[in-house]
Image (tube, rainbow, N blue to C red):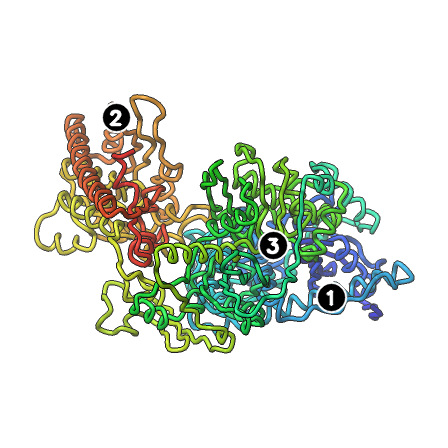
Amino acid sequence: MGKAKVEDSRKELFVGIDVGSSFVHYAVLGADRAVIYSARPIMHFANPIGAVKEAWRDISQRFGAEGIKNTAFTGSGAESFERVMKGLTYVFDSVAIPKGAETANPQAQYIFHMGAKDSYFFHLKAINAKKVIQEWRTGTKCGGGSGTLIEKQCRRLFEGEVAEPQLEETNSARTVEEKEKIRIQNRAKLQARLEEMFARAQREAEDSAEPSEFLARCGVVIQSDLIHKQNEGATRRDNLAGLFRTVARNYKIDVLGAREFGSEDSPCAIATGGVFTNDIIRKNMEEFLGITIERSDQHHNVAAIGAALKGIEENNEFVFSFEQLDEVAAHGRENRKFAPPLSESLKNVREQSQELTEEIQPGTEVVLGIDGGSTTTKGALVELRTGKLLDKLYIKTHGNPEESLKNVLKYLGRHRDKVIIKGVGATGSARKLYEKILVSKKKADELAKAGVESADRVTDEITCHAMGIKHCDPEVDTIFEVGGQDMKFTSFAPDGTVKEAKMNYSCQAGSGQTLENMADIVDLKVETTLQEAALSAERVPIIDSTCGVFMEMDENRLIAEGFSKEQIGAAIVRGTAASYYYKFVGGSGHNAVKCSAQGGPPLGKAFLAALAQVTEKQIEAYPHREMFGAWGQALDIIENIKQFEARGKKYDTAFRGWGIVDMPFDKRSISCKELFADKCCGMRDCMLEVFLIESDEIITGGFCPRGNSETANKPKTNYVDKYHKIYEKHFKKHGCLLKDLAAAKAEGRIPTTVGIKRSTATLSEKGIWSAAFFRKLGFYPVVSPRTNKEIAKVGVDNSRTEFCIARKLVTGHAALLNEDPNVDYLFNPSFIEQRSKTPPDLKYCIYTESEGYILNDVLSLDKSRQINPILHFGDAPLLLHQLRVEFERLGFGLTNRQIKDAIEFAEEAQEQFRQELYSEGDKFLKRIGTNNEKGYVGIGRDYVLLDPEASSNSGAMFAQTRGLHYIPQIYLEHKF
């Protein structure tokens, strides 16, 4: 700390301090507005007050406190400062960033800023020799947290590789000064470790040839998609490269929207904010915008510089004191709501533990169950005849599922000389990948040829957890399951059958992972120190538990308000439990009697107490509750074996053997055309993942059976594909497909064309209604193709972050139709409702209701080419009136009689379309009934189920890949 003071000729010095959600940035300026000192940012690790004090000590030792005329603040962590520090200069980010950027880079006109939480765009323009903000944009709440997202993924992926620093105990300090010195040294070591993770992540991502693609949505969903990609076998470098690319694209979508730039803008565009330290993100941004973006030399500290400049302009002489900082922390805590201590709820937790000490006898027949979760991998060795758990391992995945599986097998393989494997199986998000690794395709084929049944199984997590707990305690009627990535809830009827089972939506994804991320922010370990801290808190601040992003934002507010680590720990633990119970389960509407808490987070006593507090129920915490997925998978294999034995069937396993731990796994990405040449279908060129394990070549990622080794032996009818064929057949009675429009125009006279989107309401029966309606009026309807990757990309790139994927796809379809010169008008209505003779009326989604307005805005559509009626079906006079009003606006001289006749004609065409679908549905039911087979019905919005891009290609996945009799609900609506 012994730095020599800097004697500066500029007597008066002005300090700017930016207290962000992760870092404290600071700079010193002279009265002439020149930057004298731009410091290295301090990562505060949930102690921003301590970091501000550290920054002040640095400044005082360099320049002397007596030379400082003003201290100005900015940043989310300093918002409450001026309530305590009367006379303080506080500057909003939106003022400080452009002001600082103008000084640091006088040529700057376009400023792209990305911080840990907030993102901004500024367009500066000189007017009368003075720079003014001509344009200002910011991101949405759902799209925030880019820097935090990168930080937590780097922690997750590299914490097992970058060694933890040796921290010095503060107990040895004899004075407050010594204690503070040790604290600063420890903090610097932790920051250095995290910066090493960032550097490694960038270096690794630079080696990626094929970055993974994630739809740019909120941080929770990006994290969820990233983990699922990881568990499908994508490499870490490709996932990192994809993450960095998505952060850049998310900025473009969420902050810039449809804003365009030209090459002439390049010389005056700069990047600021800590996220742009990453060159890959900056280069991706350049690619997306088509301009060159220079990183400012002061990119970390522009807001701090801007705050100092504001102090100069105000000629303010306020300088803060350490005592005032302590008052700020106390003030921020005053208006919080609190829950009782978690420790009080421990009386409602019944925790049980059990050691696995029994010696395994030679010749014991066992099955092996693996649970490949998002953040952890679990393995269970289970006795075949009793279902007893013999041995287990629970480890972190660290972003490398293949290596984690090897480590689990290496550990359980210590019993290889004593056990006989009779079956293997996998559950969890990595189950498909683990199935490829565990089960030899060659052996499985040999068993099938010999007429021997395979005992190996792949089972969903809900089934596995249910089997695991029911084996331990048949009286359990409710399962609260919280994992690293997924939440699940299962309730049982009195007879033991499943009454209700559900899995979280994307907004609640990443529950356990988010808890770990939030614990990392305050330097607590989720397995140990977080539990201890949370239980020791005397009160629990209540935070916004809507989703992981909102909880992280509220955690940052707690940090800024100066809450202790113990109280923050309690808040995030309770927040996770509250999110699970209130937002996902639905609160107290379930008559649970005996509740089992399962998964990774319920290993912690504090989490169990929090769950007991929010549910107001007794929580059962059984031994090995973290293993119920893997254990349940093994039990499912055992049940399958019992059925084989009852039917007198031979069975065996195609397990590759314990030697898997030493086998190399080669994998590569290759296009279908490159791999199969002339055998490729020619319609798509799917990007395939090819795995080589022993002599097995396993292909995944294809839409058709050729490009997917997991395909069932007997693929079933793809009813989504059939739907589009029926849709096109009926549409072509009245118009044509977009791909045929140019040829149709060339062949002869075609009346005025109207483009209809194959998305949202017009992907369903209203698409046929619309085609018939316009044809009857003398127009020529044209429909866009079924959604493809290009349409999806355009839609995602031009939609707000908070829109659902189906709503984003609408934008892609509208853009495609709008760009075609042969399409004269676009039909972009607002579908409001389907009124009924008896309540309730059926309402469309709010995004569908506002579709016409949003599309005109985000795509800057020509209003004179848009047909935008407001449609209330089931109310004939109102429907007729609204259509006539819109046609009059556009200058079409259509009479009430013409419009009424067109409506009647459209309803007849719609009914014919429905009847053909219902006929196909009846055939489906008859076929599975005759053959006594199971059928699976897709439930949900038609524009999701029937759109491959919106539904993860569920039609092909269920029917062709898995060989299930699967049909979307639209075919069976006449039955319910």
Q: Looking at the picture, tell me which residue is in the foreground, 438 or 852.
A: 438
Q: Looking at the picture, tell me which residue is in the foreground, 570 or 203.
A: 570
Q: Which residue is mark 2?
A: 881
**Image quarter of the N terminus:** bottom right
Residue 557 numbered tag = none
The residue type indicated by label 2 comes to His
Residue 188 numbered tag = 1
Q: Secondary structure at mark 3?
A: loop
- Which of the two marks, 3 or 1, is nearer to us in this view? 3
Real-space Cα separation, disc 3 to disc 1, in angstroms: 39 Å
Q: Are marks 3 and 2 in contact (CB under 8 Å)?
A: no
Real-space Cα separation, disc 2 to disc 1, in angstroms: 70 Å
Q: Is residue 425 above or below residue 328?
A: below
Residue drawn 47% across the image and 64% down it: 242
Image side of residue 408 versus residue 637, left or right: right
Q: Looking at the picture, tell me which residue is in the foreground, 895 or 902.
A: 902
Question: Mark 2 vs mark 1: which is more N-terminal?
Answer: 1
Q: Report which quarter residue 893 is drawn in.
A: top left
Residue 284, how many percent across, how many down? 47, 65
Real-space Cα separation, disc 3 to disc 2, in angstroms: 66 Å
Q: Are marks 3 and 1 in contact (CB under 8 Å)?
A: no
Q: Secondary structure at mark 2?
A: helix
Residue 484, how many percent across, how many down? 56, 54
Image side of residue 439 versus residue 318, left or right: left
The residue type indicated by label 3 comes to His
- Which of the two marks, 3 or 2, is nearer to us in this view? 3
Q: Which residue is mark 3?
A: 624
Packing grade of label 3 (10 A; few <14, some 14-19, many >=20) is many
Q: Is residue 533 above or below residue 544?
A: below
Question: Mark 3 vs mark 1: which is more N-terminal?
Answer: 1
The residue type indicated by label 1 comes to Ala
Image side of residue 112 versus residue 716, left or right: right
